[in-house]
Image (cartoon, grey):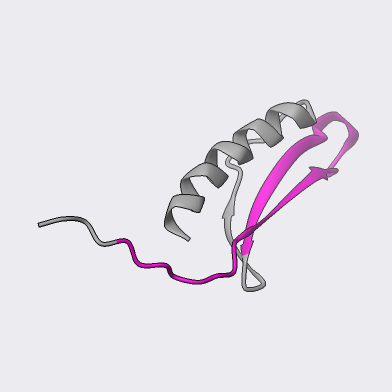
Amino acid sequence: MGTIKVKLSSIQPQFKIYESNNSVASQKWRWNVIYFGKIIGASSEGYSNKADCIKNAEKLKEILNKVF
């Protein structure tokens, strides 16, 4: 039997890239995944530069695009 793909919603999750600023020494870039106004995912680590954070978030976005 084949696999059936069911589209959950036409609304795609949104990604928010932000710089955490708890203190100057620990400023790191992070991402959140937001779906219907709720955070459903967050980076498990902070990234020293924004490009690395975006690259990591884009990997997850590729996976989520297959689901949503």
The mark total stands at 0
Could you tell me which residue is drawn at 79 percent across and 46 percent down? 18
- Residue 39 position, x and y percent, is 62, 63
Numbered range of the magenta stretch: 5-34
Could you tell me which residue is drawn at 61 percent across and 43 percent down? 43
User: Which residue is outermost to the right?
Assistant: 24
Is residue 48 covered in magenta?
A: no
Q: Quadrant of the N terminus?
A: bottom left
- Residue 58 position, x and y percent, is 61, 39
Q: Is residue 2 left or right of residue 31?
A: left
User: Which residue is outermost to the left?
Assistant: 1
- Residue 52 position, x and y percent, is 69, 27
Question: Is 34 rendered above or below residue 29?
Answer: below
Front one among 48 and 9: 9
Q: Is residue 8 left or right of residue 47?
A: left
User: Which residue is outermost to the front?
Assistant: 2
Front one among 54 and 28: 54
Could you tell me which residue is drawn at 60 percent across and 61 percent down? 13
- Residue 22 position, x and y percent, is 83, 44
Front one among 54 and 40: 54
Could you tell me which residue is drawn at 66 percent across and 52 percent down? 32
Give the quadrant of residue 27: top right
Give the quadrant of residue 30: top right
Q: Is residue 5 left or right of residue 52?
A: left
Is residue 24 covered in magenta?
A: yes
